């Protein structure tokens, strides 16, 4: 038994070394002229802004609506992309996409999913959009649509067109991504469905390491049979990326980095709600070792590094490919424990995107920059690549609820919100009601003295997590200083390690009171009451130093977190 485990350990080390070498080869194989970029580079931010403005103009002056079969999906994708940047659910671009997503969910729940050429893509994007905007508000629609989509999984484990039994690698990747995202947001996704999807992908890899369009099933993992002639880099990153997502779903990559109760520096009052036993049970339910998955990935990496991607002339799936590439590379970084700020592959594609963006801010909308996806969809893919949307998602969600100290300062005032008035009664909904008021327009007009100092977050872990998520969005994105103050104060009193990144972000808030609440909260959660010398009166240089110190402290507890702020 021990000998077998030792051999598995050696295989895992060999595979990781091989993948590391291939990543090294990729970096040295890049054109030497490519500059180093990050999602925060000024050129990148400017290009993203022009792309968002293009999406807004397209929404205001639509062309060809109703004639393009991908238009519904395009509107939802535009909403998803726009919300990633603007964080405004009321903006017409987002509101239009949300309406499409809700209608799709209601139809699926009432009469089931009917055959449509794009239905699996549309369902997946609808789920991503609703989860990103407000998983609490759209909870029943998310679960209902998710159940309908998962229910269309083929007997072999893949997903595809509803009127045929063949599995489709492209459609399967979006369904796998949707299931992962639902799971990260604590919606119900049966483990067996993800297990079957991953196994189908493993049985449909080509001997070269590629994936084809409609997979030919080898019937046994490890047997590699030639796939159809439509193999490509985009389908290979789709297949390999989905295998990595499946591994993450079962805790194979980040499990070793999960916060444990005995980590030095972990506050004694904090407990891991997603217990070690639960994580172990999930990993053990998946019978394929992580090193086995990584051998399939190494095969794909070897192919892609010896057959470098070259964009062909004419209309191609180029923008679809780069969005898939970013997702694949982000999960590959997680699997290999590599967090590179300016990876060569990102630099190369970013340089190309900066050079090919049209004057109106679009990508893929002109003859010269031909794309098989329309200009709106191609532009969304370009923006999502530039902002590293997958890497940000991995860092922001799914780290597990870390809850403790449910009681804030002893509750003496039971409140509820009616209109703009805070009244006594019903503690259980106090924070939830207050959040609705703070999220509305005019939150700055709320009288600060009328907000009780002894609010209490929900005792129920699920409700509490939803409250914390809404508070984090307010602390990071509200234009109301009052909302940011309340959100930061409550996050600081929550004793939740999951709130630490947002509190670190709040150390740079323009409002001095927000900065003070953030510093106090970090000191309370870390039990470092003096913090790192953080105060509301620090100079910019002192603040930047404190931010880096807090980030380093948090990364010692949770090495898998990715700071993009």
Image (tube, helix red, strand yellow):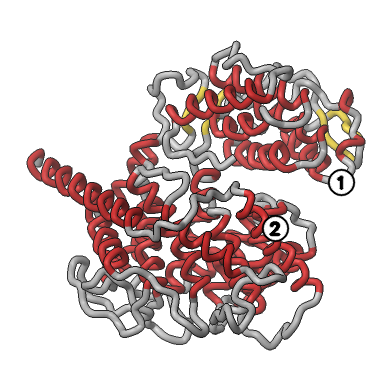
237 up-or-down from 510: above or below: below
Relative image position of residue 557 (x, y in whole percent): 44, 28
Quadrant for residue 470, please give it.
top right
The quarter of the image holding the N terminus is top left
Residue at (44, 63) in percent of width and height: 325
In this view of the protein, which residue sits in the foreground, 543 or 434? 543
- Measured along the vertical axis of the image, is residue 272 above or below residue 362? above
> Residue at coordinates 37% horizontally, 59% vertically from top-left?
30
Q: Which mark identifies residue 253? A: none
Q: Quadrant of the C terminus?
A: top right
Image coordinates of residue 257 in percent, x first then y, are 38, 36
Q: Position of residue 277 (x, y in %)?
A: 36, 36
3D distance between C-alphas at marks 1 and 2: 24 Å
Q: Give the residue displayed 36% in from the left and 76% down from the top.
A: 232
Front-lying residue, 18 or 267: 18
- Residue denoted by label 1: 441
The residue carrying mark 2 is 49
């Amino acid at each position: 038994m021990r000998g077998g485990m030792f051999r598995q350990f050696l295989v895992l080390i060999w595979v990781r070394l091989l993948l590391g070498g291939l990543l090294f080869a990729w970096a040295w194989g890049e054109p030497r002229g490519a500059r180093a970029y990050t999602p925060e580079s000024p050129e990148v931010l400017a290009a993203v802004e022009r792309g968002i403005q293009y999406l807004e103009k397209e929404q205001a002056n639509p062309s060809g609506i109703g004639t393009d079969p991908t238009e519904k999906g395009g509107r939802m994708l535009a909403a998803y992309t726009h919300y990633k940047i603007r964080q405004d659910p009321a903006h017409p671009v987002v509101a239009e996409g949300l309406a499409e997503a809700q209608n799709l969910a209601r139809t699926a729940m009432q009469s089931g999913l009917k055959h449509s050429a794009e239905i699996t893509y549309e369902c997946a994007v609808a789920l991503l959009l609703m989860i990103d905007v407000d998983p609490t508000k759209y909870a029943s629609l998310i679960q209902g649509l998710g159940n309908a989509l998962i229910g269309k999984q083929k007997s072999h484990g893949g997903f595809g067109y509803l009127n045929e039994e063949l599995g489709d690698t492209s459609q399967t990747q979006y369904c796998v991504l949707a299931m992962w995202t639902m799971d990260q947001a604590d919606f119900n996704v049966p483990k067996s469905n993800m297990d079957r999807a991953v196994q189908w992908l493993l049985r449909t890899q080509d001997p070269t390491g590629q994936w084809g369009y409609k997979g030919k099933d080898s019937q046994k993992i490890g047997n590699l049979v030639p796939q159809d002639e439509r193999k490509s880099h985009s389908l290979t990153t789709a297949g390999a990326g989905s295998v990595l997502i499946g591994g993450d779903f079962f805790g194979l990559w980040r499990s070793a980095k999960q916060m444990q109760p005995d980590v030095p520096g972990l506050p004694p009052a904090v407990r891991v709600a997603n217990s070690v036993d639960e994580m172990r049970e999930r990993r053990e339910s998946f019978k394929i070792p992580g090193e086995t998955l990584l051998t399939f990935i190494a095969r794909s990496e070897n192919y892609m590094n010896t057959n470098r991607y070259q964009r062909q002339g004419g209309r191609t799936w180029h923008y679809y490919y780069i969005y898939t590439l970013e997702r694949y590379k982000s999960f590959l970084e997680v699997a290999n424990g590599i967090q590179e700020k300016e990876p060569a592959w990102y630099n190369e594609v970013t340089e190309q995107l900066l050079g090919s963006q049209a004057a109106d801010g679009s990508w893929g909308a002109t003859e010269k920059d031909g794309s098989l996806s329309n200009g709106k969809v191609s532009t969304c893919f370009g923006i999502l690549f530039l902002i590293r949307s997958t890497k940000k998602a991995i860092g922001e969600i799914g780290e597990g609820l870390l809850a403790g100290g449910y009681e804030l300062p002893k509750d003496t005032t039971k409140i509820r919100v009616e209109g703009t008035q805070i009244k006594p009664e019903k503690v259980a909904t106090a924070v939830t009601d207050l959040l609705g008021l703070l999220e509305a327009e005019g939150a700055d007009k709320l009288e600060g003295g009328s907000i009780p100092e002894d609010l209490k977050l929900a005792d129920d872990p699920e409700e509490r997590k939803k409250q914390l998520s809404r508070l984090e969005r307010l602390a990071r994105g509200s234009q109301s200083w009052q909302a940011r103050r309340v959100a930061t104060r409550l996050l600081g009193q929550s004793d939740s390690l999951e709130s630490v990144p947002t509190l670190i972000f709040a150390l740079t808030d323009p409002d001095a009171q927000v900065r003070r609440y953030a510093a106090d909260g970090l000191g309370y959660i870390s039990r470092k009451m003096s913090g790192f010398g953080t105060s509301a009166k620090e100079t910019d240089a002192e603040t930047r130093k404190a931010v880096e110190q807090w980030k380093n402290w948090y990364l010692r507890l949770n090495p898998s977190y990715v700071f993009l702020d």
